[in-house]
Image: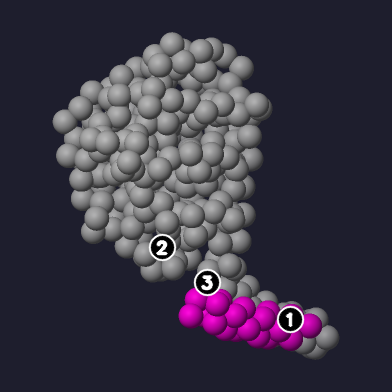
Amino acid sequence: MESPEKTSDYDTQPPDIGIVIPAYNESKGILPTIERLRAALADAPFTWELLIVDDGSSDDTYEKVKEMDLRIVRHDRNRGYGAALKTGLRSIRSPWFAIIDADGTYPEEELVRIAENREQYDMIIGSRTGQSVHIPLIRRPAKAFMRKLASYVAGIPIPDLNSGLRIMRREVVEKYVHLLPDGFSFTTTISLAMLTDGYRVKYEDINYLHREGKSKIRPIYDTLNFISLILRMAIYFKPLKFFIPVALLLMLSGVGVLFGSWHFTGRIMDSTSTILVMTGVQIFITGLMAELIVRRSQR
């Protein structure tokens, strides 16, 4: 290996944990992040391998990493955050898959801390709910709404939906790789998939620091994409969580139209009311069928 991984015999035995750092135009923050991470890992009670995935950077991110004689995989073009993580997943040998961003926002020592207790869980997530959390105010309302929506779908409170610092059992992640998108919603997808399927997921409070360089998040587009993803995951894993509210809304609207038309006009709009109620009933039945299919496939 090019990087100084801590492993007793890399050629014959895989390291305990494979750490993947996705990087896209992170020339400013990538080297300090790697240096701090390696320092934190120096006394770690597990063996590890480190892989950087350059997602087609147009700056000198790749060249800087190569100068450090580190193991790096490079995409020929920018494919997305999730695509970089999937490349890393395919490239490591370890049974545990850990990720951390290259921009210096996640305290590197926290990765070591959460990794020490990994055997009791299927995924441990560094939740950005510590004492020092620097998330722009303009992004907080959207994040809060998405957390509420995702918590409803999963059936449990979710303190951080898309944290970029976590460790996961590789075999479990590979089970869902066909669902994992190439964009930023990779972490949201794997969180919802494992939570709704009943895997052991733990959240650990961590701080969230000021980033080095410019954020790649597109606030409006990515927020809408996250919401769309959460709804799709609800249909895929918990259909009734999606179909019942829609069905009830339509049926109640039908009843409302019936009484409203009679109250305000003295006439009954029976056709509109009937269409709304019957559509609601059909959607409810569709939800029941989808739920049966999901449960049957999980056996």
How much space separates mark 3 and mark 1, taking CA atoms? 20 Å
Q: Which residue is mark 1?
A: 279
- Dot 3: element: loop
Question: As rendered, which of 117 and 148 lies closer to the eye?
Answer: 117
Residue 43 in picture, x, y percent from top left: 16, 31
Q: Residues within 10 Å of mark 3 (few under 14, many from 20)?
A: many
Q: Which residues are magenta?
A: 275-299
Determine the residue located farthest toward the right in the rendered image.
271
Residue 288, visible in the rendered structure? yes
Q: CA distance from mark 3 to mark 2?
A: 11 Å
Q: Which numbered disc covers residue 111?
A: none
| Identity, as a three-letter code, of the amino acid under mark 3 | Lys
Dividing the picture into quadrants, the one containing residue 136 is top left
* The magenta stretch spans residue 290: yes
Left or right, 63 with respect to 93, comes to right
Residue at 47 percent of width and 47 percent of height: 187
For disc 2, the marked residue is: 195
Q: Earlier in the sequence, mark 1 or mark 2?
A: 2
Q: Residues within 10 Å of mark 2 (few under 14, many from 20)?
A: many
Drawn side of residue 134 relative to residue 273, left or right? left
* Mark 3 lies on residue: 238
Question: Residue type at mark 1?
Answer: Thr
Give the residue displayed 20% in from the left and 45% down from the top: 116
Q: Is residue 253 visible?
A: no
Nearest-to-viewer mark from 1 and 2:
2
Q: CA distance from mark 1 to mark 2?
A: 31 Å
The secondary structure that most of the magenta stretch takes on is: helix
Q: Position of residue 297 (x, y in %)?
A: 55, 77
Element type where label 2 sits in the image: helix
Residue 261 on the magenta span: no
